[in-house]
Image: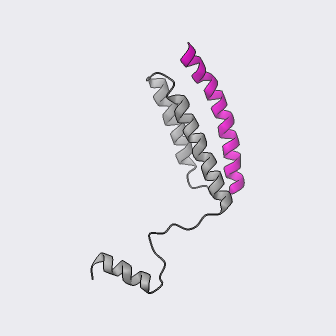
Amino acid sequence: MRQGMRFLAAVSRGQPSKLKKPAVSLDHFIQRQRVLGLWREIVRALHKIPPSSTRDELHNYARHEFERRRDITDLQHIRYLLSTGKAEFDTMRRYIDEQVVG
């Protein structure tokens, strides 16, 4: 049986689809949006720095920190990481502002 036909047969039998992701709670959805917002804010700020090794290092550092914590699902831990991430970004932003002005 072809792959598409197997998929349709599985759906018609009421088996859960392998294509659907598990539903997340509203709190998880909101925290995810906040994390993505912080990531976008960091990337936008880094693009203000002229292309250099410093900019690349800061981008790689931020990306590594986000990816390292990708699988965390505990809401309290996510909130903690967001608050510490924002504080760390504020410190980084001061450095970025010095690079842009100076």
Which of 77/6 is in front?
Answer: 6
| The C terminus, quarter of image | top right
Residue 88 appears at what percent x and percent y?
Answer: 65, 33
Image-quadrant location for residue 86: top right
Residue drawn at x 65%, y 39% as measured from the top left: 85
Prevalent SS, magenta region: helix
Q: Is residue 60 above or below residue 3?
A: above
Name the one closer to the observer, 59 or 25: 25
Residue 89 sits inside the magenta stretch: yes
Quadrant where the image shows the N terminus: bottom left
Residue sticking out furthest to the top: 102
Tell me, yes or no, whether the highlighted magenta stretch contains residue 91.
yes
Within the image, what quadrant is residue 42 found in? Answer: top right
Question: Is residue 50 toward the left or the right of residue 74 in the image?
Answer: left
Q: In the current view of this chain or complex, which residue is farthest to the bottom?
A: 13
Q: Is residue 2 above or below residue 78?
A: below
Quarter occupied by residue 24: bottom right
Describe the colour scheme in one phrase. Answer: one colour
Q: How many marks?
A: 0
Question: From the viewer's perspective, is 65 left or right of 79?
Answer: left
Residue 16 screen position, x and y as percent: 49, 78
Q: Is residue 53 left or right of residue 27?
A: left
> On the picture, is 8 further left or further right than 61?
left
Please give the name of the residue rendered at 61% of the width and 46% of the height, measured from the top-left corner.
35
Write down the region rendered in magenta: 74-102
Q: Compared to 15, does 71 lie above or below?
A: above
